[in-house]
Image (tube, rainbow, N blue to C red):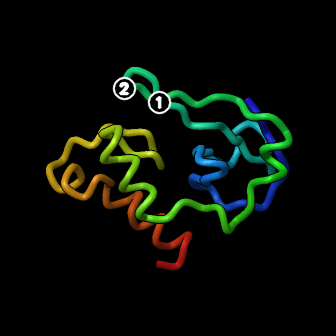
């Protein structure tokens, strides 16, 4: 697990065409867990990242709703929470309602 003291909002960020999940650490107060999202054989994996990636992540790199929908259409699960899209309206929109709201709040859309 890669932890860092950063000021990023929890969410998914896009850097160099790859997606990175940022969460507040449950284990270390005031730190965040940052992992690269990788899809292989229809399954979502969270991989450790190097410190240089952490240093390059910035608030303006937060994914847009369009990026999240593109990911959902391609892989059939949500990039924000990692859950499979099963409800009919979530499948049609390619993102769940809770994660859609979170992206809109984070990006001001």
Relative placement, left or right, of 103 versus 30 is left
Relative placement, left or right, of 63 versus 20 is left
Name of the residue lying farthest toward the front: 16
Residue drawn at the location 43% of the way across and 39% of the way down? 82
Quarter of the view holding residue 11: bottom right
Quarter of the view holding residue 42: top left
Q: Nearer the viewer, residue 21 or 17?
A: 17
Please state the horizontal and vertical placement of residue 71, each as a whole percent of the image.
Answer: 40, 47
Task: Examine the rendered structure and indicate whether residue 8 appears above or below residue 18.
Answer: below
Name of the residue lying farthest toward the top: 41
Relative placement, left or right, of 95 versus 29 is left
Residue drawn at the location 30% of the way across and 47% of the way down? 73
Q: Which residue is mark 1?
A: 39
Please state the horizontal and vertical placement of residue 108, each as a whole percent of the image.
Answer: 52, 79
Q: CA distance from mark 1 to mark 2?
A: 6 Å
The dot on residue 42 is: 2
As helix, strand or loop, the secondary structure at mark 2 comes to loop
Task: Examine the rendered structure and indicate whether residue 67 appears above or below residue 26.
Answer: below
Name of the residue lying farthest toward the left: 88
The dot on residue 104 is: none
Residues tagged 1 and 2 counted as in contact (Cβ below 8 A): yes
Relative placement, left or right, of 94 versus 55 is left
As helix, strand or loop, the secondary structure at mark 1 comes to strand
Task: Examine the rendered structure and indicate whether residue 55 appears above or below residue 1.
Answer: below
Please state the horizontal and vertical placement of residue 78, each as a whole percent of the image.
Answer: 39, 45
Please state the horizontal and vertical placement of residue 88, each as a whole percent of the image.
Answer: 14, 50
Residue drawn at the location 80% of the way across and 34% of the way down? 50
């Amino acid at each position: 697990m890669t932890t860092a003291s950063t000021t990023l909002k929890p969410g998914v960020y896009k850097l160099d065409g790859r997606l990175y999940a940022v969460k507040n650490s449950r284990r270390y107060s005031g730190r965040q867990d940052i992992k690269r999202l990788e899809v292989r054989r229809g399954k979502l994996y969270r991989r450790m990242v190097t410190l240089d990636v952490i240093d390059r992540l910035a608030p303006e790199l937060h994914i847009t709703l369009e990026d999240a929908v593109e990911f959902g259409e391609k892989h059939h699960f949500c990039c924000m929470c990692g859950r499979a899209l099963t409800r009919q309206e979530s499948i049609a929109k390619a993102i769940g309602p809770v994660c859609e709201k979170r992206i809109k709040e984070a990006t001001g859309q």
